[in-house]
Image: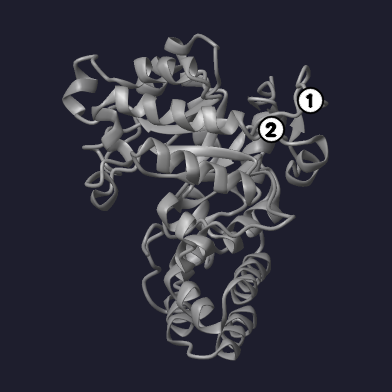
Amino acid sequence: MPPPPLHIGPLRLSTNLLLAPIAGYCDLAFRTVCREFGGLGLACTDLLSPQGLLRGTATSLDLAKTNDFDKPVGMQLYGSDPEIMAQGARWAVEHGATVVDINMGCPVDKVTKKDGGSKLLTDLSRAVGVAERVARELEKMPLSAEEWAKRLGDARFGTGAAVRGGANVPLTCKIRLCWHTSDFESGAACSPHLARMLADVGVCAVTVHGRTTEDKFAGNVRLEGIARVVEAVDGRIPIIGNGDVREPEDARRMVAFTGCAGVMIGRGALSTPWVFRDTWSLLVDGVTPPAPSEAEIIAMIRRFFVLMQGQRDDRYALFQISRRVSWFAKRLGIQPDGKRVGVKPFKEAVRLARHPEEIHAALDRYLDGGLRTWDSEPEAAGAL
């Protein structure tokens, strides 16, 4: 049976799949590429500093950039000051957000040392206080039906939404299981209790990354931890599972094991932006579409580069394609018999390019059969 539609507050998403706010990768160009393949219900921006948004710093404004095609879009804020977070949420609504999300799960030191991200898991009263203050701010900003029409994209208002009188931009939170792995293993993880408290103050959905802060990104996702949160909220709000979804079957396994209402995909999308299309097809129809051809993958890489040029400039686009080509090239070099051919020369040509014309030349050479290592050991499938 296909999963029931995912509702986040008044919104009904077109699919139950979300693109995670991947720090350093989830820019407008990448979100666009993922959307063009299909299957994506909601995409999130990179982590946004509310202070940076309010000051108008170039980096923050670039990370928050969106357009009419990039809908529905979530804007994720990180921080621990309730007032600053509330004003950041106001900025997000004023600049096109369909959903506002609070990051309570980032394990990176530069975020947690400022009491943001998953550091909030160590002080639940503070975490809930931030969420409540942001929720109250969003209630002051109901959008008209006309404004909602501009930012819904493939989402729709769910049945019973009071559209005529305006509906608020919904608030969501992204959390981890807890800070200490020992707490999870002893059954004392804070996430089930925190999810219930967040629902109490108006949070419309919670995404749970199935690792602890101490885990960071090591080891396997703990599906049983996500399941505990699903059980704890008892259907009050949807719980979205996150972690280790690299293939469509991973998402189906997560839904079946945990009972989560949706799946958020992060790093798994970096090498396969079409993973949302494939996953949704598997969840709904039980079949996975054929993988894109090498020509289609090369076209996707070219598309990303051109979009990045438009987003910033040639220099920035060259920098971004050089750092991402290893991800994009992971699915290249697979022969019809399943064997792999090395594509290191192709990746090196892209990394060494100093002008846009050299990027296009490398893409064209690969399409013509060049920039491969036919007579050497194939590269490992997971190598960067």
Q: Nearer the viewer, residue 31 or 219?
A: 31
Q: Taking 74 as reference, is 377 above or below it?
A: below
Q: Nearer the viewer, residue 91 or 221?
A: 91
Under mark 2, the amino acid is Pro
Residue 10 point in image, percent of width and height: 69, 26
CA separation in Å, label 1 and label 2:
8 Å
The local crowd at label 1, few if under 14, some if 14 to 19, many if 20 or more residues have their Cα within 10 Å, is few
Q: Is residue 31 left or right of residue 323?
A: right
Residue 122 point in image, percent of width and height: 23, 28
Q: SS of the residue at dot 2? A: loop
Under mark 1, the amino acid is Gly
Q: Is residue 156 left or right of residue 249?
A: right
Query: In the rendered image, which quarter contains the C terminus?
Result: bottom left
Residue 171 point in image, percent of width and height: 54, 31
- Colour scheme: one colour
Query: In the rendered image, which quarter contains the N terminus?
Result: top right
Q: Is residue 160 left or right of residue 123?
A: right
Mark 1 touches mark 2? (CB < 8 Å)? yes
Q: SS of the residue at dot 1? A: loop
Residue 340 appears in view: no
Q: Taking 4 as reference, is 92 above or below it?
A: below
Q: Which residue is mark 2?
A: 142
- Of the numbered discs 1 and 2, the one sitting upstream in the chain is 2
Q: Taking 88 as reference, is 239 above or below it?
A: above
Residue appearing at x 52%, y 62% in the figure: 61
Q: Is residue 363 left or right of residue 159?
A: left
Task: Tell me how many marks there are.
Answer: 2
Residue 30 appears in view: yes
Say which mark, if any, is on residue 165: 1
Residue 140 point in image, percent of width and height: 61, 31
